[in-house]
Amino acid sequence: MRRVSGLTGVLLALAMIIAAMVSIGAQGADAASFTECPPVVSDTGCQFQITVTNSATTVASDPTQLTYNGTEDALVGIVNDSSSPVTEVTLSAEDELFGFDGDGMCEPESATGPIPTGCKVQEDTAHEKTTNFGHQCGYEGELHETETLSKEIEEFCAFEAPAGEPAGVTFPEGVEIVGYAKNGDPVTGYEGPRTWFSGITALGATPAARGVVNISPALLPGESTYFSLESPPEGGFGVGTTLTTALSASTVLQGTPVTDTATLSGAGASLAGGTVSYNVYSDEACTKLVAAAGSAALSNGAAGASSPETLAPGTYYWQASYGGDVNNKATASACTSEVLHVLAPTKTSTTQTAGGVSAGSLTVPQGTPVTDQAHISGTEASLAGGTVTYSLYKSNKCTGAALSTSLVTVAAGVAPASKAVNEKPGTYYWQATYAGDGVLNAPSVSPCGSEVLIVALKASVGGLPTANVCLSKRSIVAHPHSPRGVKIDTFEVFINGALKSRGRYHGNAIIDLIGLPKGTFHVAIVLESSKHKLYEEVRTFHTCVPKHHHHHHG
């Protein structure tokens, strides 16, 4: 019992009052932040306040209010800030919350000071009513409800069981009781005026201590009540949690919105309330915020999606954070667990080269090696890596098996040329496929048909001036000869790969170099037979500055 009778009891009571005053002066000098709890021994208010809202049940502490008996016991208030009545609150921790040891706020062992009005003497542990059954607990001279107790009454102290508490409430082994209420249920002395405990896990049997604080009558919106605990958990309320996340995509093209979702796991995840917040960062430490992606409520451990974010090209790190509640500790997903690559669009174009001539479309005599060159463009193309695959097709839709392929590695946006091809006469189509770098630049493919390669039969058509002289005359009439036994229908003249002229073949073809600067030019004459076979001869000509003749006047 916390007090003794007689003169010794009076002296001890006086000493306890003085000690209580000293304790209150030292510990309760600051006004209590949470006043739902009455003064108990050395506390003037709640050490903890549990607040119930529509979205979460959270807990806050008042550092000015320590354990009310100076060793371990804690006062806890409950406030209903939701829009609905509250009938119960579940509490969890990673160490024991409900290891009651038989004293409580109505009979705090080895402590002095006030106890709450409403503490009554209960039946003893043998279910025998005491002489003072139902009377206010306290000691002689103690003030309760504006009246001073005329005698000391302190045995088996606890609050009466609320009217709504069902009969048959039990406690696990290890929880000490102080007596029995009128309905026959055991009481611990830690119950408040409207509360009782149920569902307390066996002490030490699980990694998370858990129990239910029941409230009767129900706590209406705006109301509050209180109870006490054997000791606040050393590691804080709630159990450990883990937050895992999933992006809607890990690699997207610029302009594509991305969302994140989160799932909370842990022993108390099914009870979790509150919200998960999403953020996007540009660094692996998640310190450089790029976008706040909103928040979403938790329901049965699953959070809704973030806001959709459309980001510039680059690499981003998403992180989800959970603020915790009375049953779950705060946590955040690992910064590098979600990496998003936003890729800039690219375009791939190509240019083929043969015999010193580069052009989109080329006609070359058989036996001429031809290479293709890809050009990657885009806002981030100068940083592009990855690979380019060159393919040569017979189909003008670039379908079916490629006749030739080659793979090159892109560095700083530059793709090397393909390996050389040397095909038999016919018409061919190049296509270059850029695979993207997966980090900054998106894949792209050159259009099929943007490059046409025609391989003609090599011929010596004759009728061309020598290529070893410098031509100052810029328009040449050539008289190519058709191969023996071949009827020529049309001719084409190409200068440096560009078509210069074409027409019906009548025994001559004009090579027009007018307007070209001094330099070297590759001239190709392509003859097409009546059977649609192509014959080609290529010459290189050097142009020079025409000589001006001076006339003498007599």
Image (spheres, rainbow, N blue to C red):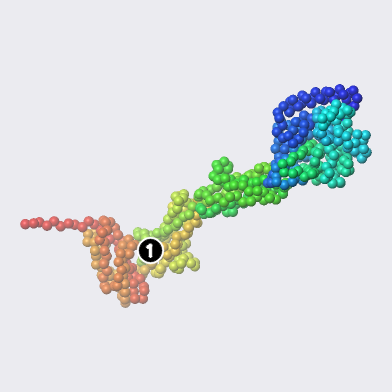
For the C terminus, the image quarter is: bottom left
Looking at the image, can residue 336 be seen? Answer: no
Determine whether, in the image, residue 227 is placed left or right of residue 288: right
Give residue 132's quadrant in the image: top right
For the N terminus, the image quarter is: top right
The local crowd at label 1, few if under 14, some if 14 to 19, many if 20 or more residues have their Cα within 10 Å, is many
Number of numbered discs visible in the structure rendering: 1
* x 74%, y 28%: residue: 27
* x 25%, y 61%: residue: 514
Determine whether, in the image, residue 147 is placed left or right of residue 224: right
Amino acid marked by disc 1: Ser
Front residue (pair 7, 148): 148
Front residue (pair 263, 45): 45
408 shown above or below 155: below
The residue at the far front in this view is 146
Determine whether, in the image, residue 512 is placed left or right of residue 245: left
Q: Position of residue 430 (x, y in %)?
A: 43, 63
Q: Position of residue 378 (x, y in %)?
A: 45, 53
Q: Position of residue 354 (x, y in %)?
A: 37, 61
Looking at the image, can residue 473 be seen? Answer: yes
Give residue 517's quadrant in the image: bottom left
Front residue (pair 75, 265): 75
Front residue (pair 532, 132): 132
* x 46%, y 55%: residue: 346
The residue at the far left in this view is 554
Tag 1 secondary structure: strand
* x 60%, y 50%: residue: 306
Q: Position of residue 91 (x, y in %)?
A: 75, 43
Q: Which residue is mark 1?
A: 361
